[in-house]
Amino acid sequence: LLDASGLLFEHDAATVETLLDEYLKPANARLDLSSTVFGRAGDYEATANASASPSSSSSPPKPAEPLGYYNRFDLSQNCLPPSDETCNAAKAGKPHIEPIFGTPFWCQLLDNKLLQEWMQCSEPHLPPPNSMLSLPQQNEFVPTDFSLKPLPPADCDHPLLNCSIKLQIPVGKRKEWFPATVTQYNGTKNQILCAYEDEDEKWHKVDVQSSELTQQQLQSPEFEGSLDNKKIKYRIVSLALEGERAGFKFGDGSDWDVEDGKSFPAIPPAASPSHLPKLV
């Protein structure tokens, strides 16, 4: 049972090491034993009641200042000397009274030789050669390095990665918008790989560095970027969530509502009279 006036909520390696090496050792340990071998309440209640006034209760008397008495408890003056024999309540004298619950107790020092043996056992050491105990062989398949390796430059992270975008690409004399999804980023060439609706893939050079693209910019409805030395413009259709794979959202988000059961299919327009069946 560990008891302290404060709790450590944040990891502090130096403090933990100091507690383990300097304080949590056998020399500072205290063993609390509760057993009828040391006697029962009736063994000392008669003595306590005889010395107390007739109007007092049958419970053992408590100190006038219980907390102060407990804090000023001197082990060197109130402890019994070390002994190999079981504590005898009749020979141990009048017990001390724990101030909070009124529990009687005796204190007895541990033998220095026993403490030295415990100290030796607490120090880490390997078993002797003649012992049948031994450490298992090192398993080469158990990992020891859990640090994350950097992504390769040809396939690394980028704010536009896994995002759905639409690109304004010249087609003849006109410029049309084509939906695409960013599936890869080459940090060496500062290029993004766009997968188009017709399953075609093409690399495009980003005109700005990835550090200049912030989430606030990308989330703005008015954001518009450029690719291939400002030959192509692009806009964000949807941003990928953290840890989410590329979402191929071509067109608006309602394309899959019918298949997902979120809406009814559109009602087709009425056929013209020339397309209606005629009686022959």
Image (cartoon, rainbow, N blue to C red):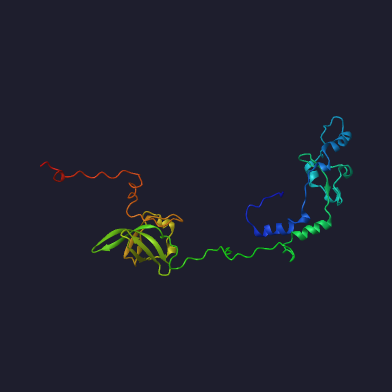
* Horizontal relation, residue 199 to residue 105: left or right: left
Q: Quadrant of the C terminus?
A: top left
Of residues 121 and 210, the one drawn nearer to the viewer in this rendering = 121
- Looking at the image, which residue is at 88% across and 42% down? 90
- The residue at the far top in this view is 55
Does any portion of residue 117 appear in the rendered image? yes
Of residues 272 and 99, the one drawn nearer to the viewer in this rendering = 272
* Horizontal relation, residue 276 to residue 81: left or right: left
- The residue at the far bottom in this view is 188
Of residues 118 and 66, the one drawn nearer to the viewer in this rendering = 118
Q: Measured along the vertical axis of the image, is residue 125 above or below residue 241?
A: below
Q: Position of residue 205 (x, y in %)?
A: 37, 67
Name the image quarter holding residue 94. top right
Does any portion of residue 61 appear in the rendered image? no
- The residue at the far left in this view is 280
- Looking at the image, which residue is at 77% across and 54% down? 28
Q: Position of residue 268 (x, y in %)?
A: 24, 45
Name the image quarter holding residue 49. top right
Q: Position of residue 180 (x, y in %)?
A: 34, 59
Of residues 262 and 217, the one drawn nearer to the viewer in this rendering = 262
Q: Position of residue 88 (x, y in %)?
A: 87, 44
- Looking at the image, which residue is at 69% across and 59% down? 17
- Looking at the image, which residue is at 65% across and 59% down? 13
* Horizontal relation, residue 236 to residue 125: left or right: left
* Horizontal relation, residue 213 to residue 29: left or right: left
